Amino acid sequence: AEQQARKARAQELRNQAQALQQQGRIAEAISGYRQSLSIWPDPDLEAFVRRLETGLSQASATPPVPSPGSTSQLVPVQP
């Protein structure tokens, strides 16, 4: 039961972070993704966050980094 609750909370944080990212609030999105990762590790999300951080530190002329699974919503947290 606790595992399901952790997974649900991580997904909620991930969804909030994605919404922030779509609003262009990248630094806040990264923070939300990191909170999600602290609850439920996900190597794919970790790699995505690293790319976001790299993009944030580069010049603003760089095209925005696409969302994970940019053709659809974020992939649910994997067990």
Image (cartoon, helix red, strand yellow):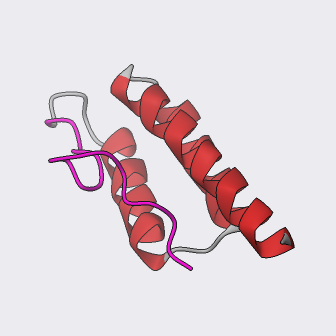
In the image: residue 2, left or right of residue 41: right
Whole-percent x, y for residue 35 in the image: 69, 52
- Tell me the residue at 46%/78% (across/down): 43
Could you say which is closer to the camera, residue 49 or residue 67?
A: 67
Could you say which is closer to the camera, residue 19 or residue 28?
A: 19
Q: Using the image, determine if residue 2 lies above or below residue 13.
A: below
Asked where in the image residue 2 lies, by quadrant, the reply is: bottom right
Whole-percent x, y for residue 25 in the image: 46, 24
View extreme (right): residue: 2
View extreme (front): residue: 1
In the image: residue 46, left or right of residue 6: left
Whole-percent x, y for residue 62 in the image: 16, 37
Could you say which is closer to the camera, residue 68 or residue 4?
A: 4
Q: Using the image, determine if residue 19 lies above or below residue 14.
A: above
- Tell me the residue at 29%/54% (across/down): 68
In the rendered image, the quadrant that contains the N terminus is bottom right
- Tell me the residue at 51%/41% (across/down): 15
Q: Main secondary structure of the magenta part?
A: loop
In the rendered image, the quadrant that contains the C terminus is bottom right
- Tell me the residue at 25%/34% (across/down): 59
Q: Using the image, determine if residue 75 lies above or below residue 19.
A: below
Asked where in the image residue 51 lies, by quadrant, the reply is: bottom left
* Residue 62: in magenta span: no
Instruction: Tell me where the magenta segment starts and ends, as one range.
Output: 63-79
Whole-percent x, y for residue 49 in the image: 44, 57
Q: How many marks?
A: 0
